Structure formats: C-alpha cells, structure tokens
Image (cartoon, rainbow, N blue to C red):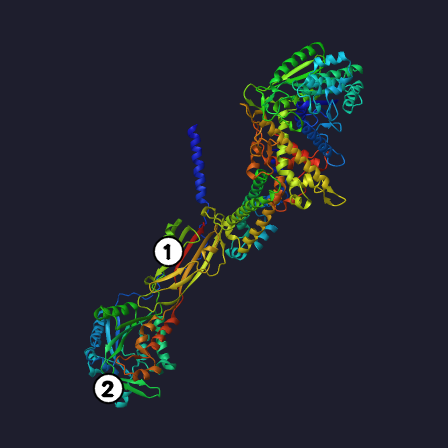
C-alpha cells in the first residue's frame, strides 16, 4: 500500500511539472475574454474563421465568450483525463504480473495499448469539443484552428501524462514504459 | 397579515411582468421597408366600353385565306365574324378600316366582304397592285394617337426587312414604345389557317422577289393593341370558339411593359406554404407579418434545414404575357448573439454577400436560400435575420420562342420556298416579335414582386 | 556473550543441521561456536552437518565482508557468526580402528582390574572396532569419553577451556549440548561431557557468568533391522531404545536431584515414532533424514542462547511437544524469544530460498554478457549494478568469478534449505497417520526412489505455472506472491552499511517477510 501511495505522490509531482500550464490556461479561459487581450487576438488570428466572423458583423469579443468557455472546459476535461490515466497506470502498474527478472519489458505492449487508449480518448475529447454539435463555439473554429488545437492538445497532454507515469510507475515496471529505464534507480525515485 | 403579504407579492409580480413586457424586445432589426406598388398592373380597369378600331389587311395575299383549300380547315372567315362580334361586345363604338398601302375606312356593311375573295382584289394599276404591302406601322401610329381605344388588326404580318430596320423600324418602335409606356399591351393571336392563293413579295437572295402559289396553309394574325383585359377577352373568345379542344394551330403572346401581375406583400399573399412544409415543424416556428407588409418566418433549425421560398408564376406573371426572363434578389443579413428575443438589445449588420439563388421553372419561381453560403457555414448560438427582396429585372422573350416555328427569316425564305412547303411561314415574324419584346423591355422597370424574411438560429 | 554448542552423536549432528538453518533465518545469537562429537567420523549425518557448517561459514564470511559484499549488521540473514575448529568433529577415540581394549590398555591392566573390566564389558565389546561409533552402547562410549575429555591441549576441548576462562574474565558464556538419550555416542556423551565441563568450571573456580544447557532427545524414530548379515554384529537395536531411555531417565532423575549439572534442560520426543526406511549400522551410509523433533532441540538451544532468556539459579527442565492431533502445524513451532518469531523467520527463509533458487539466482548466474539483459530493470540497477560497479574499470563486475562464486554458493545453500524443509516434512510423517503440511512442496520437489541416497529431489527448473504456485508455498499463512517479492525488492530501502551482493541478498531476504 505504501508503494502505491508513493506512486500516487510521484505521479502527481510528474503531472504538475507540465500540468500547471493547463490549469492556468483553463482558469484564464474560464474568466472569459478581457478587452483587447493578446490571447483574444491570437485566437482570432489563428483559431477561428476570421473572415466569416468579420462578415457576420458580430464583434469578436462577444462571440469569443463561448469559445473561451469551450476551451476552458476542453482543457479541464483533457487535464482530468491525463491525471486519471496517469494515476490509473501508476497504480495499476503495481498489479502488473511482473514477478520475475526479465518480465518487465514484455509489458511494454500493455503500456502501448493503455497509452493508445488514452490518446484515443484525448483525440475523442478534442473532436467532441471542436467538431461535434455540443458546443456552438466549435462553429467558429477554422480547419487550421482545429488542427492546431488537436496537435497542441495531443502533444501537450501526452507529455503531461508521460511525465506523470514516468515518475509514478512502479519501480519494477519501469522497463515497460518508454525510456522508463533511463530513470535513475535510487531510494528517492 | 397573510393577505397583506400575498397582496404585496402580487404587486411585485405584476410590476415584474409589466417591466418584462415593457422591456424592448428587438426580435427584428430596424428595417427599411421597400414597399411595392399596390397594383403593378396599372391599367385602369374601366368598366366603360371604349372605341374599337378594327383594321383588316386588304393586301392581295390575304385573299388566299378566303378560298378554301381542300383538306384544310378555314377559320379565317369565322374568326372575322368573331372579331366583329367581340368588337361589338367590348366596344362602344366600332370603326372598321382596311389597310394595304393606305388605311381606308370601311362601312359596317362592307365588313362582310372581308370574308370574300373579292375584298382583296386590287383595283389599282398592276404596278400599284404588285406593290401592295401592309402598312402596319400606320396602324401603330393611330394606336399611339388613340391609346384609350382598342385596336384590332387582322393581317398576315409578313414584313420585309426594310420595314424592320432603320427609319422604317422606328415607325414601328416609336409608336409601340409610346403605347407600352402608357401601360397598354399588344396581343398577338396567331392562327394557322388554310390557304389557297399567292404569297408574294418573297425576297430572293439575288434581290429579286418571287411569288409562291403552292401553299396550302399559312398563319394569319390578329394584333390587338389596348388594355390587357380586352386583349385577353378577345383571345379567350377565339380560343373558346375555335381552339377549345386543340390549340395546335393557335399561338398567342402578350407583349406588355408590365408582365408582373402584382406585389405579393401588398395584400399579404405570402403564406407559410411558400416555404417547405417541414419548416413549420421546426422548433419554435412562427409565421407573422410586421407592419402588415413583411412576412417573417421565425424558427430554430439545424444546419440541414431546407429553405426554399416558392412563388407560383401565376401569382406574379400576367397570364399569356412574355413573363419575366430575369429575376434578382437583394439580400441583407443582421446578426445578434442573443437567441431569445427578450435578450436582444441590438442587431449587427452582416456582410455575407450573396447567399441565395433564384431560379424559375414553368410553374414556379424558387428562391433557394443559402445555396451560396450554406447553413453549415453559419454559426450556432447566433440569431440571424435574413431579408430578401425579389425583383423582376427584365421581361421574358417567350413570345419569340412561341412564334419561332411559324417564322422564317429573309435569308432563309428563298431556300425555304425551294422546298415547296405546304405550310408557309411568316416572313420575319420572329424579328417583329423581338422588336416588340425589345420595346417592352425598354419600357420595363425593375419591379419588387415579393419581400420576406427568415429569423432563425441554429441548434445543431 | 559467548555461545557454544556441541552436537553429540548423529542426533546431535542432525539437530545442529536444524540449528544452522535457523541461524540462517536470523533466529540465532550474534555469535556461536559449534562443534560435533561423534566417534563415527564418517557418519552421514555428521558429514552432512559438517559440510553445511562449512557452507554457512564460507557464505557468511563472503557476505559479511566490509571490503566486499556486506549484508551489514542489521541484516538477519546469516546473522549468527558461527565459528568452528578446522575440523569441527571431535572423536573421543582417534585412530584407524580404535577399540576399548586399546583405550584402557587392557593387556597392561592388573588382573583384578582386568577382572573388573571383564565384568563390565563383554569380550565383543572390548574388541569392537569403534571407528563407526559406539553402536548404541553408552557403557562403551562413557568410558571412551571420560578417558579423553580431560585434555586441554586437544583443539576441541581447548575451546571449552577458553570459554570457561572467558567466563572467569567476566564475560557471560553459555554452552549447550544436544544429544539423544538413547543410542551410543549421544547417550554416553551427554552426561559425561556435561559433568566434565562442570568439573573444568569448578577446577578453574568459575562460579558465575557460565551457564550450561542441554537438549535431550527422547526416542523419536525407529527402523526395521534386516535379519540377514546381522549375526554377531553390534548395532543399535530400536527395540532397546525405550528400555535405554527408561534407564537413562532414572539416571538423570537422580543426577539432577543431587547435582546441578545443567542450568536448563530441554527435553523432547515424538509419538508415534517416525519410521525411518533404512537401517545402516554406521558410517556414511547412516544418513537419516531431518525430522521435526530435532527442530525442537535446535529451537531449544537458540532459546537458551537468547538474551531474553534469563537463567536463574535453579535448574530448569523444559519439555515440549506438538498438539494432540495428527496434524503438525506452524503453531507447534515455538518462538525463540518474544521478538524472534520462529515461524516468521523460517517462512521468510523458505521464501527467500525459493525465489533465489529459481528466479533471481539463475538471473545473476553467468557472464556479464548473459546477465546484462537485466541491466535496465530497476531491481538490477538499484541493487546489483550500482553495488557491483567498479569505478576503476567502469564495468559492472557481477559476472566476475568472485561474485559468481558467492551467487552460486547461495543458490546451493538455498537448495539445501528447500531440501531440508521438504525432507523434514516428508520423512517425519511418511508411513504414519500424521500429516505435516507446513509448506506445499510437491510442485517443486518429489521423493526419489527408495534406494537413492537423496530422499528428495528438488526440480532444477520450474515452469510458469509452478512458479506461480509460490503464493501457496507456506500453509497457514497469508499469500505472498512473486509479484509482492518483486515489488518489495524494488522498494526496500538499502541499509547504510550494505555493500556489493550483500545489498541484494539482504533486500531479497527482507522482501520475503509477510
């Protein structure tokens, strides 16, 4: 049990290394657009169908409220997913049947599958937020914007998840994760 | 005590509801209403009978219509009778005249002779008889001078090239322009009739003229210049009497400066049914008029909602007229990010450019909304107010097509004649009709025929 | 505190075997000198115990070496520092074919003394070749032992003299002897060696700090003696054991009543007697299996040596037996002290032996080119690689010969532990109505054929299914899986002074604790 608690703590530390950015970003978006902020302009220039929005006659700042809301919810969902996935893996790694020398590396396939499922969920969430009919603000996003959001989300949340599991995976299971064996083997980690 | 509290609560509720009623609901943006005319067909519908001038073409070639051709139906005689009868019915005063090189008055008793070959015998010299032509332009001048009368012309309508170009064509164009500008119309009734005579003044390629004697049928025409009511009456009577079962040998066109029957908004003729039935089943659908003029279709739809605004041609086009060949629409869109009317404080004018297309088929005028910018490209969570004004830009040229197979150009008639046709065509008929159309086109004004708006938001 | 243990005869040697395994498990004192007394030098059990003793001492010295591999002081694995003479066995009568006649110089005796000897001993007994023991003739053994125990220069007895000197110097000394009450060497040696020790103590005026304890094994096994080829032979007759025991008990009763020889005596036996399958008169063929009652004697000795054991002035006699049913349970095994739980320690050792023998030992055996496939695994990196890395050569030296010797020796020792436990479990109850299922062993071992010297054969390799039965290894215990072991070795903290292979060995040992 102690090992599992240790794993949980290390996972949370690993998640925090990059995850704070998502948290801050969610909070920033949750507060809504703020006048002529750089973020508002960046969204306009890079994420949305600028021409369509301009031609609609609607002020961007008014429309952006729902986009901010969408992004806040999306990043919250993605961060939660990364946290849950990292914790599930880290805790679950203690129950992988790595009970003999030389077995850990065979569980690499488990990690690949698990990570694949996690990435699939990330893709699914991004798709649901940006392409489905759930959020009206998804209509504002351009194809390039969706691509940008998808690419950044996939890369970033993979890294958040990865750092979490890199630190939190059970010591004996580290060989089952990519570059996990590079971690120093000491009493701390 | 309890009563006091209840009374206070009631007062508060009343104030709130009053306030909410008073709160300005801007469910529609501030609109500039282009209101159409009450009636586009500005002919004075006078119940008073006016003068009727009947002109019979006395040129020798017309004689062939009075001589029976074995195996062919001869309606000329009967129609001449009908004209006489109809004229008596619609006019207060009937003045008969004949024309050839000149226009000469006729006695009433001489009208019967029109049906006989003798009427068309030339009494002048052979040169004068050979040069007989139909001075139809003179009739148009008379019609121009007497616009309130109805002018009926019975003629073969074959016109030489010289009559349709240059200064001679002006003699046709100018009076017609004046007639049409005064809101009058020209009806052309064509009847394919038996023929047994000489068709003369057929131009050859070498510049000579020949005659043709072997035609067994040939159309004659009744031109009616006047108000549409009388024109239609005459046409209806002729059709009823002779062409009720088969209109193969009958053609009709109405040349008018105003083929538009009416503006649909004026008498609130636009209804829910002008849009697809499915639209009325959309969420929060509502159809209403603002200012007693502009119909608004309000609904909450989705990106697949089909929006097709249809108008029956019969509701906007004068029957029998050339119709309209070109419609246009003007579009304006406003947007707001508030969905509920009570939350809307202002609208923003959008700049979407062209959104819809307008097409016309045989029966309907269809405005396909959001074809150029589909609903898929619009945003959910925004309320759109889309106003469309439908205009008629140019009258149609259906009449040219109507008469095209009875027409032969001067460049083709020589060859046509060489084929020894049994049914002879009318020289330059199409050109003549196109001149009439051109004139009516020049006098046509862009007309607003309908306006409507859709006020919607998209949910998915 | 200095501790000395002497195993007398075959039974003493067997009890010492149990004691060695208990010391491996950490149940023993900090230090212990061990010696064996048997006239039958080639006795199979004595040889086996000698070999085991040497293995223990070698392995311990390799794993408690501050400049090499060090388990460190805190580790309980091979906790007891056991020392012994180069030859740990003392023969009362040396020589190729010693006889009692030669020992007492019968031919040089005065006639009246000769006559007395004739009364006491049969001619056969006087002439019996005693190189293979006293053949259950304590009368012969007593005479032999008494005549030879006085020699301070004897390398064996010099240890006893030194022990008593140490007690005189103020250090607490505890000496424990184990033997059977029946039989030859043991029956004769137990009282005589004890009395001889007390005499030395008295001679050296040592009145305090010296304590003597003993474990006396009442009959606990018997065997069938084949009739052929036994005519004229002197041999231990099992039917005489009970009579001998009866006589001996009467003797001890009187002895303890009038003379305080022992501070504490531990008495145990077994009923019904374990039926041993083979009868051997002596020599290396006399190799009886480890039996459960011997474990009692070993634990009695360890209890005697325990610092928690406060030895009073009065003589104490302890007896122990199992529960009354036919099932032998873990609860029948007494604790050595309040903080030395026998069951926990022994089960830990058994698990350690299992996992080392079949999982980790094979992984560490061989050259570096074979071993290096584990170098990315956390347990290897943390416990082996770092600890055997040579900064001068920039290489991990686990594959080097000196480390491989230790690894191999440990694997062999683990096989001995497993064999001991399995054999004890099997042999104690075979052909009886009793049942002993302290561990589940059928998936990793099997009894050999009757005529094979090894009663139990441990499988060389186990398949996955067999390995996974590890979690059923110890009966009457919560399951500890191989996964738990792996997890534990990955997370157990390395003690401060541990070095080299000692790190891994100790952590694996600690990881096997429930």
Look at 38% across and 81% down and name the residue there: B167
Chain holding disc 1: B
Quadrant of residue B324 within the rendered picture: bottom left
Q: Secondary structure at mark 2?
A: loop
Q: Nearer the viewer, residue A53 or C442?
A: C442
Look at 49% across and 56% down and name the residue there: B350
Q: Secondary structure at mark 1?
A: loop
Does C454 sit left or right of B133 as displayed? right
Q: Residues within 10 Å of mark 1 (few under 14, many from 20)?
A: some
Tag 2 or tag 1, which sits nearer the N-term? 2
Q: Nearer the viewer, mark 1 or mark 2?
A: 1
Does B419 sit left or right of C513 as displayed? left
Q: Which mark is residue B275?
A: 1
- Furthest-bottom residue in view? B126
Q: Residues within 10 Å of mark 2 (few under 14, many from 20)?
A: some
The residue under label 2 is B122
- Furthest-top residue in view? C258
Residue C13 point in image, percent of width and height: 68, 25
Does residue C50 sit above or below C325 in this rendering?
A: below
């Amino acid at each position: 049990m102690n090992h599992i608690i240790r794993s949980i703590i290390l996972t949370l530390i690993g998640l925090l290394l990059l995850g704070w950015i998502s948290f801050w970003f969610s909070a920033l978006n949750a507060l809504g657009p703020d006048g002529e902020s750089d973020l508002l302009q960046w969204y306009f220039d890079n994420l949305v169908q600028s021409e369509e929005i301009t031609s609609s006659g609607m002020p961007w700042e008014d429309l952006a409220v729902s986009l901010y809301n969408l992004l806040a919810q999306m990043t919250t969902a993605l961060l939660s997913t990364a946290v849950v996935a990292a914790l599930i893996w880290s805790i679950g790694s203690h129950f992988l049947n790595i009970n003999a020398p030389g077995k850990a590396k065979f569980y690499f396939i488990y990690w690949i599958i698990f990570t694949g499922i996690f990435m699939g969920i990330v893709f699914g969430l991004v798709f649901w937020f940006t392409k489905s009919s759930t959020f009206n603000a998804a209509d504002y996003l351009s194809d390039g914007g969706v691509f940008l959001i998808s690419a950044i989300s996939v890369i970033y949340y993979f890294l958040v998840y990865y750092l979490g599991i890199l630190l939190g995976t059970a010591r004996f299971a580290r060989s089952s994760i990519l570059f996990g064996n590079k971690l120093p083997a000491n009493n701390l980690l | 005590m309890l009563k006091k509290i209840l009374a206070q609560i009631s007062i508060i509720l009343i104030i709130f509801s009053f306030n909410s009623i008073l709160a300005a609901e801007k469910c529609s943006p501030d609109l500039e209403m282009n209101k159409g005319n009450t009636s586009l067909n500005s002919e004075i519908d006078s119940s008073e009978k006016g003068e009727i001038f009947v002109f019979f073409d006395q040129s020798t070639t017309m004689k062939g219509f009075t001589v029976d051709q074995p195996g062919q139906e001869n309606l000329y005689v009967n129609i001449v009778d009908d004209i006489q009868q109809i004229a008596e019915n619609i006019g207060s005063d009937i003045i008969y005249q004949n024309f050839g090189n000149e226009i000469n008055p006729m006695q009433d008793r001489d009208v019967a002779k029109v049906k006989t070959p003798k009427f068309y015998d030339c009494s002048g010299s052979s040169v004068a008889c050979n040069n007989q032509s139909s001075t139809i332009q003179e009739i148009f001048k008379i019609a121009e001078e007497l616009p309130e009368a109805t002018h009926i012309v019975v003629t073969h309508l074959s016109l030489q090239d010289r009559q349709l170009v240059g200064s001679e064509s002006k003699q046709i164009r100018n009076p017609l322009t004046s007639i049409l500008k005064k809101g009058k119309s020209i009806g052309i009734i064509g009847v394919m009739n038996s023929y047994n005579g000489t068709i003369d003044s057929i131009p050859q390629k070498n510049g000579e003229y020949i005659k043709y004697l072997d035609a067994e049928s040939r159309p004659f025409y009744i031109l009616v210049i006047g108000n549409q009511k009388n024109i239609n009456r005459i046409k209806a009577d002729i059709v009823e009497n002779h062409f009720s079962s088969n209109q193969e040998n009958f053609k009709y066109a109405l040349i008018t400066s105003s083929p538009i029957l009416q503006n649909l908004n004026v008498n609130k003729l636009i209804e829910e049914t002008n849009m697809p039935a499915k639209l009325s089943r959309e969420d929060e659908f509502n159809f209403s008029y603002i200012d007693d003029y502009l119909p608004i279709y309000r609904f909450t739809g989705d990106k697949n909602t089909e929006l097709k605004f249809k108008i029956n041609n019969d509701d906007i086009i004068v029957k029998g007229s050339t119709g309209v060949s070109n419609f246009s629409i003007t579009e304006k869109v406003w947007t707001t990010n508030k969905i509920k009317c009570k939350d809307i404080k202002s609208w923003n004018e959008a700049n979407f450019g062209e959104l819809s297309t307008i097409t016309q088929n045989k029966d309907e005028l269809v405005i396909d909304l959001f074809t150029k910018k589909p609903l898929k490209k619009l945003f959910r969570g925004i309320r759109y107010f889309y106003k469309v004004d439908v205009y008629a830009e140019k009258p149609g040229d259906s009449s040219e097509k109507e008469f095209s197979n009875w027409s032969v150009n001067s460049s083709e008639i020589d060859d046509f004649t060489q084929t020894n046709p049994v049914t002879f065509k009318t020289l330059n008929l199409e050109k003549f009709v196109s001149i009439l159309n051109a004139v009516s086109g020049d006098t046509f004004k862009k007309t607003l025929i309908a306006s409507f708006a859709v006020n919607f938001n998209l949910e998915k | 505190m200095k501790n000395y243990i002497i195993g007398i005869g075959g039974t003493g040697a067997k009890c010492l075997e149990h004691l060695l395994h208990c010391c491996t498990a950490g149940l023993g004192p900090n230090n212990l000198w061990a010696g064996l007394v048997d006239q039958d030098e080639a006795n199979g059990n004595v040889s086996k115990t000698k070999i085991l003793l040497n293995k223990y001492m070698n392995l311990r010295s390799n794993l408690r070496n501050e400049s090499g591999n060090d388990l460190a002081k805190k580790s309980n694995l091979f906790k007891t520092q056991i020392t012994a003479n180069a030859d740990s066995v003392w023969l009362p009568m040396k020589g190729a074919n010693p006889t009692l006649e030669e020992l007492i110089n019968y031919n040089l005796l005065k006639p009246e003394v000769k006559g007395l000897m004739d009364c006491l001993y049969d001619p056969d007994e006087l002439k019996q070749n005693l190189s293979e023991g006293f053949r259950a003739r304590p009368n012969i053994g007593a005479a032999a032992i008494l005549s030879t125990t006085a020699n301070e220069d004897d390398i064996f007895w010099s240890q006893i003299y030194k022990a008593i000197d140490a007690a005189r110097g103020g250090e607490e000394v505890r000496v424990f002897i184990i033997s059977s009450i029946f039989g030859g060497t043991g029956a004769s040696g137990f009282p005589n060696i004890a009395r001889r020790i007390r005499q030395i103590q008295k001679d050296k005026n040592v009145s305090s700090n010296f304590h003597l304890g003993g474990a006396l094994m009442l009959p606990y096994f018997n065997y069938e003696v084949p009739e052929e080829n036994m005519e004229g032979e002197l041999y231990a007759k099992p039917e005489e054991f009970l009579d001998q025991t009866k006589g001996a008990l009467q003797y001890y009763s009187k002895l303890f009543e009038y003379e305080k020889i022992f501070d504490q005596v531990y008495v145990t036996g077994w009923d019904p007697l374990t039926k041993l399958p083979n009868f051997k008169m002596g020599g290396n063929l006399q190799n009886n299996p480890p039996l459960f009652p011997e474990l009692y004697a070993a634990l009695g000795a360890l209890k005697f040596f325990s610092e928690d054991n406060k030895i009073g002035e009065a003589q104490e006699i302890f007896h122990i037996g199992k529960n009354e049913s036919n099932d032998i349970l873990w609860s029948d095994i007494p604790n050595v002290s309040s903080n030395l739980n026998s069951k926990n320690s022994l089960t830990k050792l058994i698990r350690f032996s299992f996992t080392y023998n079949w999982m980790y030992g094979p992984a560490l055996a061989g050259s570096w080119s074979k071993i290096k496939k584990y170098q990315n695994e956390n347990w290897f990196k943390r416990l082996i690689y770092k600890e055997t890395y040579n900064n001068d050569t920039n290489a991990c030296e686990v594959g080097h010969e000196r480390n491989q010797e230790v690894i191999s020796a440990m694997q062999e020792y683990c096989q001995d532990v497993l064999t001991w436990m399995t054999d004890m479990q099997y042999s104690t109850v075979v052909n009886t109505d009793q049942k002993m299922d302290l561990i589940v062993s059928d998936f990793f071992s099997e009894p050999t054929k009757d005529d094979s010297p090894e009663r139990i054969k441990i499988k060389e390799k186990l398949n996955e299914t067999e390995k996974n039965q590890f979690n059923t290894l110890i009966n009457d215990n919560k399951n500890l899986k191989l996964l738990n072991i792996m997890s534990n070795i990955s997370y157990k903290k390395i003690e401060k002074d541990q070095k080299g292979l000692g790190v891994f060995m100790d952590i694996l040992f600690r990881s096997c604790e429930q």
